[in-house]
Amino acid sequence: MSGPVIVPLDGSSLAEQALPLGVSIARQTGRPLTVLQVVPIPTSAAPGETGGVLTVEEMLDLLRSRAKVYLADVEKKIKEANVGVSVEGLIVTARTPAEGVAAAADEHHASFVVMATHGYTGLSRWALGSVTDRVLHLTKHPLIVVRPQEQEELVALSEEALPSLKRIVVPLDGSPLAEHVLPFVADLARAYDAELLLYRVLTMPFTGLGVDTGFVLAEQYWNVAREEAETYLKGVAGSLRQQGLTVSYNVGIEPVADAILAFADQVGADLIAMTTHAREGLTRLIMGSVTDRVVRAGRVPVLVTRPETEQD
């Protein structure tokens, strides 16, 4: 957790909307910031801008040259903002953008990778379920996904404009896998003096019983499940408080993603932090379902981790 905060960029203003949070985290944690651009390896020769045909090597040189100019401009913008962050540009050549981001994160021992769910390079699109999803499945490092605004405005990087993480919602389901995210949110909580809000959503198992019997059992189930959930969350909160952190907890009722989103809105969360795989069996939190919906429909960034036992 001592490496840089990496912000992958593709040259678009949408992708750059991840910069304020990346800069803020680097500033608060005292870690360097790396702005990264991945140059895809060309698969064939292509027409040149002034005629003729560029070889694969010439195409690669041209793309790297453009990336160097672009990242230098981003570095300059950050340095001129005078926010007390050490920044450097990094160009990685890879077969795909996701492989390049993951390789850079692993090689440089990234503390966090902060990237937008959408960015544009020609007709391609960085979207949850493609590049962002693949990065998550290729690296052990925590990924913070920022959902950019539709309008393409210039990114503000002044000290006053940087986001702050004061309330972090942490969905847990009682499993050790879901708790994998806790060291990372504890790190951020210490840096921002933030409050951690642990949240567990209760789900009703399908019984296949009649309506009358099912209703009675359901009421009994909710009472027992809530008591168990509160006992569990109280224990996790106590452990975190021993680390000097401010922690509270609450319990909600399914549907899981909607409950998480509603709770985050209710408490004014600045970040939601969760593990992509949690409870084992058929009710796992997986990319493409709960986590995917939380990222797509949420109003705040989402920190996503995947336990090493779940990595490809």
Image (cartoon, rainbow, N blue to C red):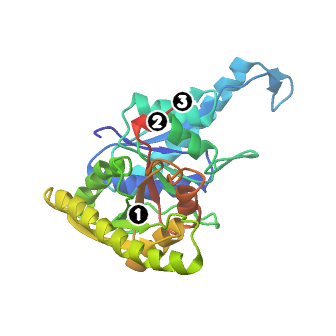
Q: Give percent across and percent down for residue 118.
A: 62, 53
Q: Quadrant of the N terminus?
A: top left
Q: Give percent across and percent down for residue 269.
A: 39, 71
Q: Could you tell which of marks 2 and 3 lies nearer the N-terminus?
A: 3
Instruction: Identify residue type, mark 3.
Output: Val
The residue under the point 59% across, 27% down is 94
Q: Which quadrant holds residue 99?
A: top right
Horizontal side of 189 relative to 221 (left or right) equals: left
Q: Which residue is mark 2?
A: 139
Q: CA distance from mark 1 to mark 3?
A: 29 Å
Horizontal side of 23 relative to 49 (left or right) equals: left
Q: Which quadrant holds residue 308?
A: top left
Horizontal side of 206 relative to 224 (left or right) equals: right
The residue under the point 32% across, 37% down is 3
Q: Which residue is mark 3?
A: 92
Q: Nearer the viewer, residue 188 or 81?
A: 188
Q: Which mark is residue 271?
A: 1
